[in-house]
DNA sequence: GTGGTCTAGACCACC
DNA sequence: GTGGTCTAGACCACG
């Protein structure tokens, strides 16, 4: 479910965060379902528990999960969070649009490419 | 021309690289025009010459400039490079489109927002 | 009567303690009335009896209840305890007032806000 | 400047966070001034650098400071943050006011105590 | 020198 | 068993 790419320049804990964000947002991991324990996941990925711990702590801070001492970690994604994430996404997109203008891509080229890209994924 | 933001989390050399890329792609710096010397720029920005050196080396590696021993560094931008940048941009955009799908944004919402965003910048 | 919030970061036994304190101080639970047995409450909340046990033990230590072997646990609230709680509360408030000063809130702003806040709750 | 209380039940890194928040909000540490390095502070307090690191990371997340690889950590408090912190403070105060009502403290008693407390600190 | 990531291994509180 | 804190010590990127 989680794959670590050691060639990736980003830190391990960040890769884990991103992967879980994806799984949770997509609904692969259902709300209130239990996540693998820190130790188990660490063993499974053969990395240090502290690294998992750091990833889980950040995911908790961002509202993707909640952890309880002695019980475990659980998915806490909800519609409210979805809205927040959409806002964050739009901000990110804004930066890219600005970049497109620098590269002299016309509005038509850009939207066409976005639509095209969206559909290509659709097929997949 | 170059402004360093010390509050920016990214390393200084990366900020310099990005700024030069922007100036070159936009055509503010004309092809074959000479860039400031490593020492001069370092003094002007009051930072370590090694940092400028690293930025120039990376820009040369990416094809934005060429250096001539004993003479200096020169802009080497051409349309070919623009194409490369566009490809890189599209790849980046692709990731974001995938993210949009995860967040359950419809194709219509997405393209509408992109167009809207493009025009908003237009006014500026 | 007791609700456990699993998303709350605090341990379960602490949530139970706080809830009983509130019920007892407010007078919802009358002095010398009997509390639910450890086992019953554990079953009702579907949690580990050890957790209830720990909560009751702490409440007894703090003087909120007393236990009689073989008979059960009983509320032991009295005005003396109310005074103790008020002292604890004032200490807590003291810290917050200090914090207000650090944030450069004037005495007038602070007291006005407190009064305002008190009345707002009044309506509820 | 920083004192660790090992009898305190709260984790060390939290004590450090709180202390720095205080020093920064009060203006003892001026904006853009450099903080002690992770390693130096760790040595000075005879604790592990990782613990300081964790505290600094959280302070950065909360907007109290910014860190740059290879350069150090710097105070970044500003008026904007002051406003945010005031809002957070008021929320905290709201909870306490509710608690006061449970303890049957009248509005007059409460505001009088707050004012009194504020002035007492004034003298100090 | 600086901050940041990671490992190995320990201990605690909680259930 | 669970999550969370802490230590000791290593390595990397940056300036």
Image (cartoon, coloured by chain):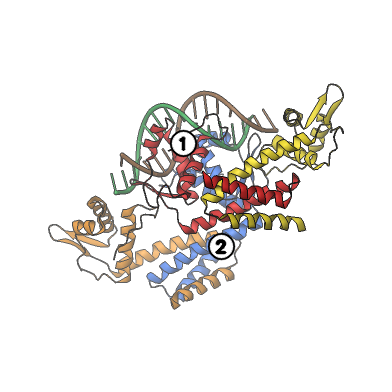
Chain colours: A red, B yellow, C orange, D blue, E green, F brown
Q: Position of residue A64 (x, y in %)?
A: 46, 50
Name the residue at the top extreme.
B69
Image point (13%, 61%), residue name: C71
- Counting every numbered tag in the picture gives 2
Circle 2 packing at 10 Å, graded few (<14), some (14-19), many (20+), is few
Identify the chain of the residue marked 1, using the numbered disc in the image.
A
Q: Which residue is mark 1?
A: A51
Q: CA distance from mark 1 to mark 2?
A: 34 Å
Locate residue A69, reporting x and y percent.
Answer: 36, 46
Q: Against D94, is B118 above or below? A: above
User: Which of the pair C90/B109 is nearer the observer?
Assistant: B109
Secondary structure beneath dot 1 equals helix
The extreme left residue here reads: C70
Q: Quadrant of residue D95?
A: bottom left
* Left or right: where B67 falls relative to A13: right
Q: Judging from the image, what secondary structure is the residue with disc 2 in?
A: helix
The residue that mark 2 highlights is: D87
Above/below status of B109 relative to B74: below
Residue C32, given in percent of the width and then of the height, sits at 20, 68
């Amino acid at each position: 479910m989680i794959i670590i790419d050691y060639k990736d320049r980003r830190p391990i804990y960040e890769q884990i965060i991103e992967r879980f964000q994806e799984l949770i947002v997509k609904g692969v991991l259902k709300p209130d379902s239990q996540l693998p324990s820190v130790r188990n996941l660490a063993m499974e990925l053969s990395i240090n528990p502290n690294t998992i711990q750091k990833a889980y702590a950040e995911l908790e801070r961002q509202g993707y999960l909640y952890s309880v001492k002695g019980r475990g970690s659980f998915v806490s994604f909800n519609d409210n969070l979805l809205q927040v994430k959409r806002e964050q996404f739009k901000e990110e997109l804004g930066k890219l649009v600005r970049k497109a203008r620098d590269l002299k891509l016309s509005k038509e080229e850009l939207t066409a490419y976005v639509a095209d890209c969206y559909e290509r994924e659709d097929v997949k």
